[in-house]
Amino acid sequence: MTKVYNFSAGPAILPHDVLVEAQAELLDYAGTGISILESSHRSPEYIAIHDEAVANLSELMGITDDYAVLFVQGGASQQFAQVPMNLLPSGQSADYTNSGSWAKKAIAEAKRLGSVNVIADTNDTRPTCVPDPDSLEITPDAAYVHVTSNETISGAQWKRFPECDAPLVADMSSDILSRAIDVTPFGLIFAGAQKNLGPSGLTVVVVRKDLAEAAPENIPAIFRYQTQIDAGSMYNTPPCFGVYLFMLVTRWLKGLGGVAAVENMNDEKAGRLYAAIDGTDFYRGAAAVEHRSAMNVTFNLPDEALEKRFAAESADVGLKGLKGHRSVGGLRASIYNAFPAEGVDALVAFMADFEKQNG
Ligand code: PMP
């Protein structure tokens, strides 16, 4: 069978060793005779998994006791609403940066709930890019400043974050744990798990405890971060299997040498792919060079028909999921932490062949 490389943007590739381990213990977790899928979230086995998951993330990201790590459901999309519900009191406004499709959705949701200033807008800029962190005019007394650290669809990534007095809030769904970041300027970080962390259904939230505590009392309990902080993410049944896989993924990442080690690997993989794109006029990077994502490499061919053929023929030889997002077209290679370097080499070789046949 042809070796398959999964370039899907999410749900995305998971570390092979993690899947093998999960498979091996699927029917009988740690000698209990039952699957972790069947175990109570109050069982000592699950609680050990949950605690290790929190500890691993805290270690990998350098998260201090000033923050709580929460495992919740509802995806990053729910966070678009939950963030302003908790962190945007009436009488104050929040600053949002519109860097692309996902930022735009976060803005639309926040506007339903409070006063929002869009302080930068690169959504329609081509090549795609994110705002310049140094030229933002941050509203005095803004409750927070929202950024989307990596725009999964356009393939544009913040390389540096704004420096400001207000806490930063970041949607890190598609690049969390892919590179070293200093957590301290952030009031809240959220990420749907299905790219770098585990399966869909799990959402990870890292929130500064003082901000969570100050949230209004009158929002529904399930949406109040403090509710989940008080309950150790067990106010309702957590997405246990997702947390279990997340624990294995973070354990795997620690084994690789942590975030600094994987960042080097990611830069190396992305560098090779961008070099192939830049090496010819046939391929054109969709994102501005200085904002190119190390996670989602977006590119175009001379016309749409060729892009369609590229997506179909690459899939036929086992390079799956390269078709760009339906809203923008083109091609997109998502090369998250778990994506192997040899898969990038296989794509680079395919690109050269395809150009020879069609260029
Ligand atoms: N933000 C970003 C950056 C994303 O890539 C996605 C999903 N692709 C979302 C938010 C939405 O996530 P979810 O489907 O988990 O709600």
Image: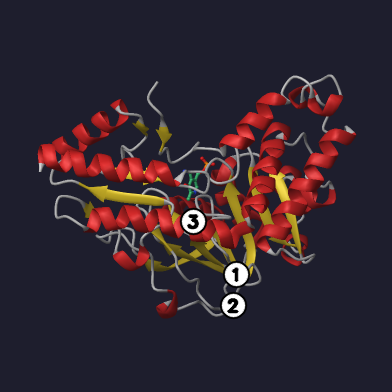
**Residue linked to disc 3:** 265
Picture layout, residue 211 above or below residue 2 = below
Q: Position of residue 225 (x, y in %)?
A: 73, 52
Is mark 3 in CB contact (under 8 Å) with mark 2? no
Is mark 1 in CB contact (under 8 Å) with mark 2? yes
Task: Please indicate, yes or no, whether residue 171 appears anywhere in the rendered image.
Answer: no
Q: Is the residue indicated by label 3 positioned so its CB lies within 8 Å of ligand 1?
A: no
Is mark 1 in CB contact (under 8 Å) with mark 3? no
Q: Callout 1: helix, strand or loop?
A: loop
Q: Callout 2: helix, strand or loop?
A: loop
Q: Position of residue 254 (x, y in %)?
A: 67, 53
The picture quadrant where one finds residue 354 is top left
The picture quadrant where one finds residue 145 is bottom right
**Going 77% across and 34% down the picture, which residue do you hit?**
237
Q: Residues within 10 Å of mark 2 (few under 14, many from 20)?
A: few
**Residue linked to disc 1:** 92
Q: Amino acid at mark 1?
A: Gln
Q: Is residue 82 left or right of residue 220?
A: left
Q: Nearer the viewer, residue 326 or 225?
A: 326
Screen quadrant of the N terminus: top left
First in sequence, mark 1 or 2: give its number. Answer: 1
Image depth: mark 3 or mark 2 in front: 3
Q: Is residue 132 left or right of residue 124?
A: right
Distance Cα–Cα, label 3 vs label 2: 40 Å
Q: Position of residue 56 (x, y in %)?
A: 73, 52
Task: Please indicate, yes or no, whether residue 341 appears anywhere in the rendered image.
Answer: yes
Image depth: mark 1 or mark 2 in front: 2
Picture layout, residue 270 above or below residue 76 = below
